Amino acid sequence: MDIHKLEFGYLFNQLVSNFHKPQGSDFSSLLGLVTPLSLTIGLILLLMLLRKLLVFKKTLQEPSVLLELTPPSFTEKQSYTTDQLFSIIHALGNQRSFKDKLLGTKARFSLEIVSSQSQGIRYVIRTTPKQVSTLKKSLVAYLPHLRVKPVNEYLPVDTGVFRKSFYNVIEFTLSQHFAFSLKRQSELDKHDPIAYLTGQMTKLDSEELISLQLVVSPSGNKRTKKISKLISSNGDVVKYLKTLGIFKWIFYNSYRAPKTKSPSEMEIVNAIDAKINQPLFETTIRLFMVFKERNDLSERMQLFHQQAISH
């Protein structure tokens, strides 16, 4: 063996030379791996984009049916039975065809409170034609004296109606992770939380409109599996939920280390565990308002913001 070949300078030069001038066979092998991988990734991304476009197109083209709900003047239904109603809606939304599952199409229900001078305050559910019959039966089974009837679209088709008015759309979002428990409204016999909202939807002039819209779609348990694992391993669930974006994935294993929790932390974790084990919905809350005067619009917007924050 040539001792010269063992010197550091010789070895370093060989390393640099091999790095900048790869052998033809090695370079060809590398290209042979990169090209199929790039094509596969590109094809997957293209299919994902096509899938989203098809779902978006179907959502725009699919007709909607509005059902107006007129509740009885008195009901003995408690909050528990309301939970059962949403469990029924959740199960109904999960009854999807193979094509819908393949495309990733989700069933959506829009729960709306609409207020106008001519028709007062109305409760409306917006759904698709194929869901109308089953949804109506579920509602009447929940509340036998409930009146359900199809109604026309309340939003004007002609956008020129708004040319002399001021309008705005507000979308409400959560300030924390969805797994944190919301305030539970269990004592409905003492106060009605909807009354705080409908109280701000009165005293409208002609051609003025307020619509509160809750778009709900049944959600699976994919987003809650990691949270459940953290709870079962006594990990740091709260810290995990407060971590932003990609860092959740990076530091997930470190959060699984068992952690001694204070009584207040245990209460929070128990509330999280109780929530994620219920039927969950992906929910979008929007408020649409049309007023003749800009000042009236701004004033109502402030009032709704205050009510949303306090309740």
Image (tube, grey):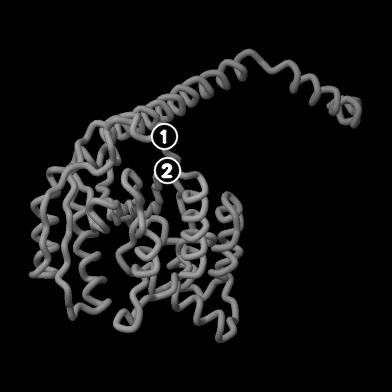
What x and y, as percent, mark residue 302? 52, 57
Determine the image quadrant of residue 196: bottom left
What x and y, as percent, mark residue 6? 87, 30
Residue linked to disc 2 = 292
Q: Helix, strand or loop at disc 2?
A: loop
Residue at the spot 60% in from the left edge and 59% down from the top edge:
243
Q: Which mark is residue 250?
A: none
272 and 131: which is toward the camera: 131
What x and y, as percent, mark residue 143? 13, 70
Determine the image quadrant of residue 129: top left
What x and y, as percent, mark residue 103? 28, 37
Of the 4 image quadrants, the one containing the N terminus is top right
Residue linked to disc 1 = 164
Residue at the spot 24% in from the left edge and 31% down from the top edge:
61
Amino acid type, callout 2: Lys
Residue at the spot 90% in from the left edge and 28% down from the top edge:
3
20 and 142: which is toward the camera: 142
Mark 1 Cα within 10 Å, few/some/many (few <14, many 20+)?
A: few
Amino acid type, callout 1: Lys
Q: Residue lying farthest bottom?
A: 263
Q: Residue lying farthest top?
A: 24
Q: Do the CB atoms of the residues marked 1 and 2 lie less than 8 Å apart?
A: yes
User: Label 1 vs label 2: CA separation?
Assistant: 7 Å
Mark 2 Cα within 10 Å, few/some/many (few <14, many 20+)?
A: some
**Residue 105 against residue 140 in the figure, above or below:** above
Q: Residue lying farthest front?
A: 205
Asked if residue 156 lies left or right of residue 298, the reply is left
Earlier along the polypeptide chain: callout 1 or callout 2?
A: 1
